[in-house]
Structure formats: C-alpha cells, structure tokens
C-alpha cells in the first residue's frame, strides 16, 4: 500500500509541476487508481505541500516509539500458540506472550485471518478437509432420508441446526 501511495504522491507532484489545480489532480488520481486512490483531503494536503516547495514524496519521520509488537516473530509466536490450543482466549494469549490484548487481536484478525467462533480461534475459510467432511455428512443424511421412511419423525430441530457433531478437543 505504501508503494501505491508513493506513486500517487509522485503523480500529484507532477500535476503541480504542470500547474494543475488540486481538484483536477484529484479527478485524475480517481481516474487512474479508482477506489484505491488517495482521499480528497490527502490529495489536497499533498498538492498544497508541493505547491509550497516540498520536493520529497516520502513521509517525514514521526516522533514517538516505533511499534515493536506486530513483528514477524510475534506473529509466528501467536500462530504457534493458537494452533497448539485453540481454546485460548485473547486474555490468556496476551498474558502468555506478554503482549497487549489489542495487539494479539489485530495479529489474529489481520495477519492470521482468524476470527472467534464458539470458544476457539478458527480460520475464516473452510479447509478442503472441512468441506469434504460437510459434503460427506450431507450425502449420508440424503442416503438416510432415502432409505428410512420415518427419518424425519426422529429429527429434533432447534436453533437452526440439527446435525450433532462432537469435537473431543472442545468437548462440545
């Protein structure tokens, strides 16, 4: 994303050199980059900075301590710990890894693409094995419906689900 922003800033600088207005520059960015273009406010801010003589398209150094929590090492530590025990909560993960709970949540959701379901962290997309298991269960149910006349009389429904699958790891 940073590379795309730098390219757009170069384009803004070029438009300033051609004496294009900020509005025209913004329209050209929208035309070239579509939904990934800089916002109107950012475009106008950079346009003004280049008009005032700024030459550098890179961000200036910011004060404050640089972030050290979302490193590749910490992402791997969170991944390993979650894979070893899927029942860990955010609080438990943050205590074991000595990280802020918010950072652990960001790593899980943004970097590892996981979300909380029931009492464990799971990937957002089903794996091939999970898809095959669901398909096999459905085929088994279709066979039972075709072969057993009173199958539906023995089905109890509730809460939109009627297939029971016991997972020994979660004890549910």
Image: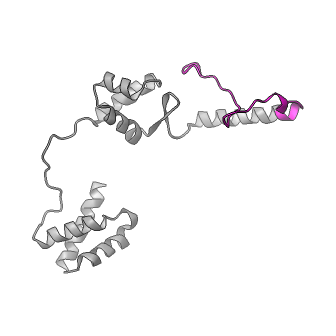
Q: Quadrant of residue 60?
A: bottom left
Does 47 appear above or below 144? below
Q: Up-down: is 171 above or below 6?
A: above
Depth check: give the residue in front, 62 or 156.
Answer: 156
Say which of 130 and 122 sits in front: 122
Left of 144 or right of it: where is 172? left
Name the residue: 33% across, 27% down: 94
Q: Is residue 64 above or below residue 152?
A: below
Between 158 and 73, the residue placed more toward the observer is 158
Image quadrant containing the N terminus: bottom left
Q: Quadrant of the C terminus?
A: top right
Q: On the image, which quarter does residue 132 sit in?
A: top right
Residue 39 image position (x, y, % from top left):
31, 64
169 in magenta:
yes
Chosen colour scheme: one colour
Front-lying residue, 131 or 153:
153
Residue at 35% over, 31% down: 76
Identity of the residue drawn at 45% across and 22% down: 85
**Which residue, as the protein is rendered here, is positioned at the far right?**
149
* Vertical position of residue 7 compared to residue 62: above or below: below
Magenta stretch encompasses residue 134: no
* Residue 113, horizontal then vertical, whole percent: 44, 40
Please, what is the dominant secondary structure of the magenta stretch?
A: loop
Q: Residue furthest bottom?
A: 19
- Region in magenta: 145-172
- Taking the image as shown, residue 63 lies to the left or right of residue 85, namely left
Residue 72 picture quarter: top left
> Which residue shows up at 25% across the image and 68% down it?
43
């Amino acid at each position: 994303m940073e590379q795309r922003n730098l390219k757009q800033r170069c384009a803004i600088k070029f438009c300033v050199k051609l004496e294009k207005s900020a509005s025209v520059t913004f329209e050209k960015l929208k035309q070239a980059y579509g939904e990934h273009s800089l916002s109107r406010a950012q475009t106008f801010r950079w346009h003004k900075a280049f008009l005032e003589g700024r030459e550098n398209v890179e961000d200036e150094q910011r004060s404050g301590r640089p972030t050290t929590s979302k490193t590749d090492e910490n992402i791997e530590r969170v991944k390993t710990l979650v894979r070893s025990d899927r029942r860990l909560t955010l609080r438990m993960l943050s205590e074991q890894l000595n990280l802020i709970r918010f950072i652990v949540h960001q790593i899980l959701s943004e970097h590892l693409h996981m979300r909380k379901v029931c009492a464990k962290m799971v990937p957002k997309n089903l794996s091939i094995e999970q898809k095959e298991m669901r398909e096999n269960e459905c085929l088994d149910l279709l066979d039972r419906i075709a072969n057993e006349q009173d199958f539906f009389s023995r089905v109890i429904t509730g809460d939109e689900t009627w297939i029971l699958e016991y997972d020994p790891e979660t004890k549910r």
